[in-house]
Image (cartoon, rainbow, N blue to C red):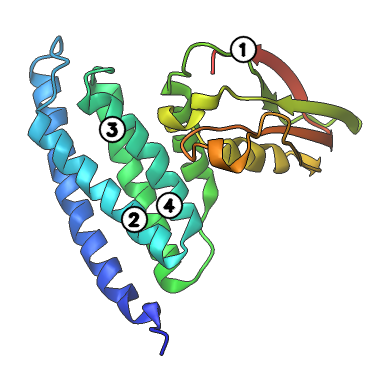
Amino acid sequence: MAIDIRQFHQTFFDESQESLVTMESALLQMERQLAAAPGNTEASLDDLNTIFRVVHSIKGGGATFGFGWLTDFSHLLETLLEDLRAGRRRIDRAMANLLLRSVDCLRKLLTSARTDSPVSKSDIDQVSAEIEALHEYPAGNSAAVANVTQATGEVCAWRIRFFPRPGLFASGNDPLRLLRELARLGELRVSADRARLPAWDALNPELCYLGWNSPARSRATPSVKSFPG
């Protein structure tokens, strides 16, 4: 007999909201410490671990229950927190403020999932864009990424080719996020390039073998920029 996991939704929502209070408290404490010592960029590892556990738990629950936007945003935030915990990034007041704004985003996404209602995406998209801008792309690749702003010009046809290096996943990057953002800008058709896909017995599930060809039609104006990644 199949178990209806919806019976566990309310427990997940309640525990997540309580955890966000803990996360917010730790961030406010961190912000006060940074304000008192502006030159200090060392965050308490205990506080960072607490914040990371909250986000990781929410991401896991969101994935289990099929709350896609909540899972995607939590994953993006979790990757940034991993960098902070590992010392690859230093925290400052602007970073602490960004993390506090992410708490508000998580609350909105949880409320949307709990009430089965649409969520205003403008704030969440803005915070997501700021977090993504902080992510360091791994070295060893020169994939061209379009930094696109909406325009009112005529519809143009674009051919977008995205071939990430095999180790893309290890940096916390997800090609689906890029494809979803491109799809929001206009008509997009995506096809996978499987030329690098090895035989089944040689396949490593932690590596990215696929590339993507994505013809698109949009009024967006591209400013093409190359990133290592």
121, 57: nearer the viewer: 57
Question: Which amino acid, mark 4?
Answer: Thr
Residue 199: percent from left, percent from top = 63, 38
**Which comes before the other along the chain, label 4 or label 1?**
4
Residue 191 shown left or right of residue 24 in the figure: right
Q: Residue furthest bottom?
A: 1
Q: Earlier in the sequence, mark 1 or mark 3?
A: 3
Rate crowding at label 2 as few (under 14), some (14 to 19) or many (20 or more) other CA atoms within 10 Å: some
Disc 3 target residue: 81
Instruction: Tell me where residue 35 sits by quadrant.
Output: top left
Side of 174 relative to 45 (left or right): right
**Which label number is shown at residue 65?**
none
| SS label for mark 3 | helix
Percent coordinates x, y for residue 130 in the rendering: 45, 28
Q: Which mark is residue 142?
A: 1
Marks 2 and 1, how far apart at CA: 32 Å
The first of marks 2 and 3 along the sequence is 2
Cα–Cα gap, marks 4 and 1: 28 Å
**What is the distance, in whole Å, between disc 4 and disc 2 at their CAs?**
7 Å
Residue name at image x 25 percent, y 73 percent: 11
Question: Callout 1 environment at 10 Å: few (<14), some (14 to 19), or many (20+)?
Answer: some
- Which of pointers 2 and 1 lies earlier in the amino acid sequence? 2
Residue type indicated by callout 2: Gly
List the residue tagged with mark 2. 60
Q: Residue at x 15, y 13 (%)?
A: 38
